[in-house]
Amino acid sequence: MTEEQVLALATQAMDLGVKYGLDLLGAIAILIAGWTIAGWARNSMLKALGRVPRIDNTLKPFFASTVRYVILILVLVAVLAQFGIQTASIIAMLGAAGLAIGLALQGTLQNISAGIMLLFLRPFRIGDYIDAEGLAGTVDEVGLFTTHLTTYDGVYVEAPNSQIWNRAITNYSRLPKRRVDVAVGISYDDDIDTAQGALMDLMTGDGRVHKDLAPQVLVTELGDSAVTLNMRCWTDAGEYWGLLFDLNKAAKQRLDAENISIPFPQRDVHLFKHE
């Protein structure tokens, strides 16, 4: 190899070194800048979401991390473009991969989207007692994939978010007050006014009954075996079950004291003798 050829190769190597060296330095600069911007964007998103009380704390790091990863993906594409790699095909490949992953994880993504909607719209909160068309219990945790419930008899239930989001949700703890209804049957031979007065005294004498919403004792049905009276009053949501059970017991005791009977269903049977 002649001196001229060696010099040409050296010159070519220097040119390539300068070219790719500059590309490498540019890529490193893009990585450092992108990493810094991604971290700044995540922290800024966390601070911004922290000022929005409606968004659940579970969602805030999720949204912030999503912004960070999107920026890092864009940075990676920019680094590849720095070395002359066609990014259009890479973007198309990422889109196809995302579509394939989305189809493979369709059920999981449904649970995630349902979890986000539950956390954002908040049809219920931690500690609320809900009934989602038969799926009932006290809410212990709402995650991105599942919701954890404890039933009234102490059974742990972990339900996919999509099953709860797609049902009608009854929240028994959302409002501060609940109406208590206790049905009591009395005999047709008993005096209705006396029975109504006795049952009304029970409710007005109980401190858990709200006085601003006047309690009532209504005649709701003239049944086959009894006249049905309905004790109706309002109480705090947390006092509902205790008051309901106590009123059932007290109603029986008070009517017994007033010599008012609570009849059971009866049927008259007539026998005909055929000759």
Image (spheres, rainbow, N blue to C red):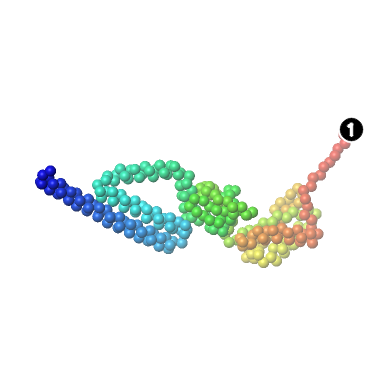
Q: Is mark 1 on a helix, strand or loop?
A: loop
Of residues 129 and 182, the one drawn nearer to the viewer in this rendering: 129
**Residue for point 47% across, 46% down:** 108
Q: Residue furthest right?
A: 275
Instruction: Give the quarter of the image for residue 243.
Output: bottom right
Residue 107 locus on image (x, y percent)? 48, 44
Q: In this view, does 258 lie to the left or right of 125?
A: right
- Quadrant (top left, top right, bottom left, bottom right) of the C terminus: top right
Q: Is residue 91 left or right of residue 255?
A: left
129 versus 270 height, above or below:
below
**Residue for point 65% across, 58% down:** 241
Check disc 1 and give the amino acid type: Glu
**Residue for point 24% across, 55% down:** 25
Residue 223 locus on image (x, y percent)? 74, 49
Residue 252 locus on image (x, y percent)? 75, 58
**Residue for point 28% across, 48% down:** 80
